[in-house]
Image (cartoon, rainbow, N blue to C red):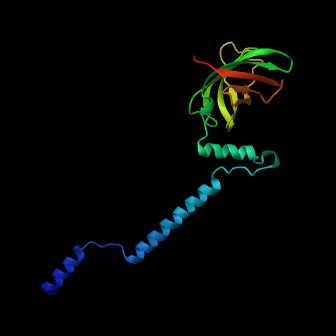
Amino acid sequence: MSSTENSSSASGSKRPKGLSKEAWVAISTIAAALITGIVTLIIHLAPQKPAASPATTVTPAASASVAQVARGLTADSIAGKWLGTAKDENGVTFEVRLDVRKGCGISEKCGSMSVSNTPCYGYISLERAHDPTFEFNVDNFYGESDREKCQPGAGEEFQLLPDGKLEYRPTYEPHTQGILERTKD
């Protein structure tokens, strides 16, 4: 073997060998197939939202709530402290207090409410809002609440009146109506 043949074969063996074009195409194809497979598994194995049955059909009010969340609707127009009296259909009169924090959005904890007749002292979250009407959920009763009589749930409805007062009309029985005014403290 001549010295030229030795040097070219020696230099040829020192040159790093890379992957061929065909090898890169094969690797890319395998990677794409793996990604597709993983995405398919995730889609099929992830918990699926149940199909709507007649009992869970989306109502206009429910779809409005979704739209309100998207728009960032808050209870700012009634934010603050309110105090007033209410009277139920049995003639029982009682005090109602409401404290709503500014920026309170749908499904957010946003203040407290109390009624003196039961008594119930609980935290509220905004259930629905169609300004000037706001419905709150009350739960997590505290203090001297009568835990046997205080029931958690939605239905505490308030409507801002043109004169700046707040009308209280719960959606459950006994039917009750009251008027609250803003307080300074």
Q: Residue at x 78, y 24 (%)?
A: 177
| Residue situated furthest right in the rendering | 90
Is residue 176 toward the left or the right of residue 126 in the image? right
Rendering quarter of residue 109: top right
**Which is nearer the eye, 22 or 40?**
40
Q: Quick check: 22 above or below 35?
A: below
Q: Residue at x 67, y 37 (%)?
A: 131
Count of numbered circles on the image = 0
Q: Quick check: 56 above or below 173?
A: below
**Which is nearer the eye, 126 or 179?**
179
Q: Position of residue 127 (x, y in %)?
A: 68, 35
Is residue 26 toward the left or the right of residue 158 in the image? left
Rendering quarter of residue 184: top right
Q: Quick check: 93 above or below 22?
A: above
| Residue situated furthest bottom in the rendering | 2
| Residue situated furthest front in the rendering | 163
Q: Quick check: 150 above or below 27?
A: above
Q: Position of residue 126 (x, y in %)?
A: 65, 33
Rendering quarter of residue 103: top right
| Residue situated furthest top in the rendering | 144
Q: Position of residue 62 (x, y in %)?
A: 72, 44
Question: Quadrant of the image for the C terminus?
Answer: top right
Q: Position of residue 25 (x, y in %)?
A: 44, 74
Question: Quadrant of the image for the N terminus?
Answer: bottom left
Q: Residue at x 78, y 48 (%)?
A: 57
Q: Residue at x 16, y 80 (%)?
A: 7
Is residue 117 toward the left or the right of residue 182 in the image? right
